[in-house]
């Protein structure tokens, strides 16, 4: 967390002609903005780590999905080969039957 020195900031403002009360309000507002709304280097490093972890997890999931898809395609290929073989046998059987009839 960043620390903002309101007293030092107020002194600098009053030294340039800003009224004391206005300088204090401005300093307090700046303190709230800096301490609560700005990301620190540690915050950014945590986010970068979380992003890298997410990327690694997504990559693993993608590789798993890719392997599953390849497996499914191989299974489908085998089923199609078996069906085509069956259709070929049936077709030959029909041709043989027609040849005997004619």
Image (tube, helix red, strand yellow):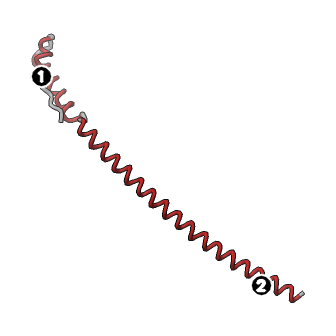
Which residue is identified by label 1? Answer: 24
Which residue is identified by label 2? Answer: 93
Camera-near label (1 vs 2) is 2
Alpha-carbon span between mark 1 and mark 2? 99 Å
Left/right of residue 101 with respect to residue 87 in the rendered view:
right
The quarter holding residue 17 reads: top left
Query: Can you give x and y, in whole percent of width and height, for residue 49 in the image?
Result: 30, 45
Query: Can you give x and y, in whole percent of width and height, for residue 16 in the image?
Result: 15, 11
Left/right of residue 3 with respect to residue 97 in the rendered view:
left
Left/right of residue 47 with respect to residue 6 in the rendered view:
right
Query: Can you give x and y, in whole percent of width and height, for residue 102 in the image?
Result: 90, 87
The quarter holding residue 92 reads: bottom right
The quarter holding residue 86 reads: bottom right
Q: Residue at x 29, y 43 (%)?
A: 47
Q: Residue at x 66, y 76 (%)?
A: 83
Q: Residue at x 24, y 33 (%)?
A: 38
On residue 79, the disc is none
* Residue neighbourhood size for the residue with mark 1, other residues' Cα within 10 Å, grouped as few (<14), some (14–19), many (≥20): some
Q: Earlier in the sequence, mark 1 or mark 2?
A: 1
Work out whether 37 lies above or below 50: above
Work out whether 31 lies above or below 91: above
Work out whether 90 lies above or below 35: below
């Amino acid at each position: 967390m960043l620390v903002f020195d309101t007293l030092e900031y107020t002194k600098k403002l009053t030294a340039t002609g800003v009224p004391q009360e206005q300088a204090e309000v401005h300093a307090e507002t700046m303190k709230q903005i800096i301490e609560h709304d700005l990301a620190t280097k540690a915050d950014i490093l945590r986010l970068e780590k979380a992003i890298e972890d997410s990327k690694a997890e997504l990559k693993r999931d993608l590789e798993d999905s890719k392997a599953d898809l390849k497996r499914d395609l191989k299974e489908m290929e085998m089923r199609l080969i078996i069906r085509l073989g069956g259709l070929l046998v049936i077709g030959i059987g029909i041709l043989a039957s027609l040849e005997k009839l004619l």
